[in-house]
Image (cartoon, grey):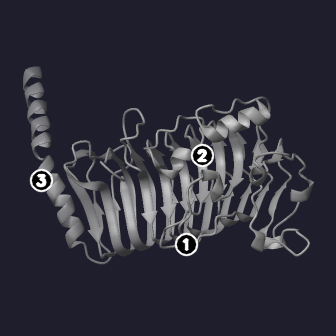
Amino acid sequence: MRILLVFCFALLAGATLSAQPDIEKKIQTQLILAEDGDVVTLPAGTITLTNTLWLDEKRRVVVKGAGEDKTILSFKNQTQGAEGFKVTNSSEITLKDFTIEDAKGDIIKTQQVSGLILQNITARWTGKPKKTNGSYALYPVQCSRVIIDHCTAIGASDAGIYVGQSDSVWVRNCIAFHNVAGIEIENTTNAWVYDNQAYNNTGGILIFDLPDLPKKRGGHVRVYRNAVTKNNFRNFAPKGNIVGKVPPGTGIMVLATHDVEIYNNTILDNKTASTAVISYYITENPIKDKAYIPYPSGISIHDNKYSTGKRMPTWKNKMGFLFWLKFGRRVPHVLYDGIQNPDYLNPDGSVRPEHRICVRNNINGTFANLKADKKFKGISRDLQPYDCTIPQ
């Protein structure tokens, strides 16, 4: 009897393996034929896929697995396409309740989607984090009304959760670790990033505006109630990526964007820069985009909790080594490069209220103006000029 059972299980296993191409074809056919309001159900089990799954020009479609621990889409043997799952030119799309892993490029990419929900999804590269992993685990770009909720991102060589050139975005209740950037909001307007955990990345949360992109200006970003801890992982970004300049040990970094409020976060044990506010000039990359504004403005950092004790800035990054030379193991938690846009100044040299950098009411919130425009000479720790609030 036992031998018969073993034989039967072996037959079932063989049938599952041989049926993989049929499952892949069935899923993609469902995506192609999906009509308004349809639910595409992904079966339980590990499904090996060789080609990108693609949903294009659809409305009100839900793609639903049996659960993150039950439905696993594996692209380890992918031979065609770059992304794992791609959604384009669509509206009111929900992807939920599955794990997706090891795509050649980005794991889930959505472009030109209005009304997007990514919920209860684990997107990961298995094995050790490495530069040959894809850039982004969850990657909405040029989208609007985006909700990323209760998702996990692991192993991205750029950003685990990345939202680019989008508008009206909520990233909440997510976990990001072993990425170069845990969560990145780039050239995106009206974003709320809250109740997330970003740990063991190179940088925890990045809010960037970059040049040479179709959408020129981001801003109006709120970052609150996040746990941003021990983001000291090595930087494994491929050479030339802008995030390759982020020093290991970065908690939150704001680069060249405006109207950002960072508050009620727990920012602990990030060894190089707990919170940094910098201009694009710090990257030392040339700026060819004449419409680009390389300065941060209207930044408010308040009521956050920082760690106590000594930290050791990285020596494997130019910025980190500079911090060590200037501060040793006492790097201030809030760092501002001090490079100001002349257009933001009043005739008396003061900064207009809406463009100020404000830092106040932070627990253990030591501060330094790095005076980068003066070759880091005369660094000031005086917080008084930055004890302010930003007009709403």
Q: Are marks 2 and 3 in contact (CB under 8 Å)?
A: no
The picture places residue 308, in percent across and down from the top left corner, at: 80, 33
* Residue at the (70%, 43%) spot, across then down: 274
Counting residues from the start of the chain, the first of labels 3 and 1 encountered is 3
Corner quadrant of residue 81: bottom left
Residue at mark 1 = 216
Q: Mark 3 vs mark 1: give the one in front.
A: 1
Q: Are marks 1 and 2 in contact (CB under 8 Å)?
A: no
The C terminus - image quarter: bottom right
Q: Which residue is mark 2?
A: 204
Camera sees residue 379: yes
Q: Is residue 358 above or below residue 103?
A: below
| Local SS, label 3 | helix
Q: The residue under label 2 is which amino acid type?
A: Gly
Dot 1 or dot 2: first in sequence order is 2
Q: Which residue is mark 3?
A: 22
Q: Residue at x 65, y 44 (%)?
A: 251
Question: Does residue 142 sit above or below 312 in this rendering?
Answer: below
Mark 2 or 3: the one toward you: 2
Q: Determine the residue positioned at 55% across, 72% down.
A: 216
Q: Front-most of 281 and 73?
A: 281
**Amino acid at dot 3:** Asp
Density class for disc 2 (Cα within 10 Å; few <14, some 14-19, many ≥20) is: many
In space, the residues marked 1 and 2 are separated at their CA atoms by: 24 Å
